[in-house]
Amino acid sequence: MKILVINAGSTTLKYQLIDSENESVIAKGLCERIGGTGQISYNKRDNTKGSETVELPDHGVALKLVIDRMTNPEFGVIKDLSEIDAVGHRVVHGGESFSSSVVVNDEVLAEIDKCSDLAPLHNPANILGIKACMSLMPGVPNVAVFDTAFHQTMPEKAYMYGLPYEYYEKYKVRRYGFHGTSHSFVSKRAIELLGKPAEETKVIVCHLGGGASISAVCQGKSVDTSMGMTPLEGILMGTRSGNIDPAIIEYIAGKEDKSIGEIMTILNKKSGLLGISGISSDFRDIDDGYLKGDARATIAFKTFCYQAAKIIGGYIAAMNGVDAIAFTAGIGEHDAMVREEILSYFGYLGIKVNKEVNDKCHDEALISTEDSPIKVFAIPTNEELAIARETVALVK
């Protein structure tokens, strides 16, 4: 089966066409700056890349251009739309309505729309992507794969906030967690590498990128995760503050004469690594500043790693042990210094880093020593492949 995977953002549309038989990527690309004059990039039949400046007034036009490039007689990778067997969509928020992936129908679309209050920047765009596919490819099944679904196995004690219970009853204010597709994919692979039945495992997944979240996976199921009702909670990130004292919002609003909306923009887009370092939200720049002795870059580096270690330590306590820790995503997969710094907090557990392997690792690897009682892996995430697998399972 050929599965088209769509990840529609507010102004972007990423895609991959995956052959489910051998899980190879046939086509991939990106539409950027949807809503005006934008850019489309794509691969050609001869494996060269194409890029064009085009008008992208909406997601429907973006998807049509994607299909035009994939089926182009001169350089396209497929002959026509009949080769696409199903479409898998990343949907950011499923609330409590969805604990697994689903085939999309009108009722499902309505429920996704109800969750838009919880993800106003993402769910509406996800819906536009689904509707565009339904319009351009009538009869082809569409599957929604939710960022939040994997974490719906969390118990109440992990997802409830210390707020009046009526806010949960009326507005579903609770922890949901995100990056679920990645946490599911990486935890499954970690369990495979452990060579034990899932029911006998305790795994912590550290998805560390521009957005970062950590999850506790016990017996193959998510039992806690660091992001909350929104992706703002948890460890500090590229531009997000992560956990702060809620009273800071009122305090800064008063001092700076800013609205709640303005403060939320600061917390989401001007904080985290960028806010502390004053240099960049990109960890490569933070590493560079840290190595050069820049004081604020050093604070950002150390704070990020310290917060990650605290969350990992808490999840070890919550699961009463851990068999494996897995690092993934841009920082987790590629930043040896971050992995080593975080793991330095767990010497008391006997974790030993294989420095030679860790320093050279940019792909899947066991980065702890063979005699380490807790295994530590670097595992590349592949959310598109995970979405394709979920789609095949539902439509095959």
Image (cartoon, grey):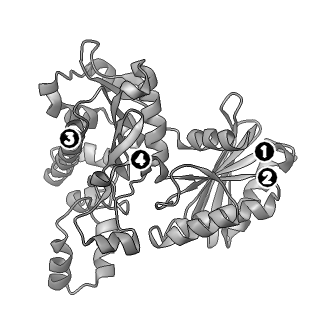
Q: Which mark is residue 85?
A: 1
Q: Distance of mark 2 from mark 3, alpha carbons?
A: 45 Å
Are the residues at dot 1 and dot 2 in contact (C-beta closer than 8 Å)? yes
- The percent position of residue 175, horizontal first and vertical second, equals 34, 59
- The crowding category of the residue bearing disc 2, from other C-alpha atoms within 10 Å (few below 14, some 14 to 19, many at least 20), is some
Residue at 87% across / 44% down in the picture?
A: 79
Residue at 39% across / 57% down in the picture?
A: 176
Residue 380 in sight in this render? no
Q: Which is nearer the eye, 19 or 219?
A: 219
Query: Which amino acid is tagged 2?
Result: Val
Q: Distance of mark 4 from mark 3, alpha carbons?
A: 23 Å
Q: Is residue 1 left or right of residue 286?
A: right
Q: Distance of mark 4 from mark 2, alpha carbons?
A: 30 Å
Q: Distance of mark 1 from mark 2, alpha carbons?
A: 6 Å
Q: Distance of mark 3 from mark 1, alpha carbons?
A: 43 Å
Query: Which amino acid is tagged 3?
Result: Ala
- The crowding category of the residue bearing disc 4, from other C-alpha atoms within 10 Å (few below 14, some 14 to 19, many at least 20), is some
Sequence-wise, the earlier of marks 3 and 1 is 1
Are the residues at dot 4 and dot 1 in contact (C-beta closer than 8 Å)? no
* Residue located beneath label 4 in the image: 153
* Residue located beneath label 3 in the image: 309
Q: Which mark is residue 140?
A: 2
Residue 178 in sight in this render? yes
Q: Is residue 113 left or right of residue 262?
A: right
Q: Distance of mark 4 from mark 1, alpha carbons?
A: 30 Å
Residue 253 lies in quadrant: bottom left
Give the structural element (helix, strand or loop) at label 1.
loop
Are the residues at dot 3 and dot 1 in contact (C-beta closer than 8 Å)? no
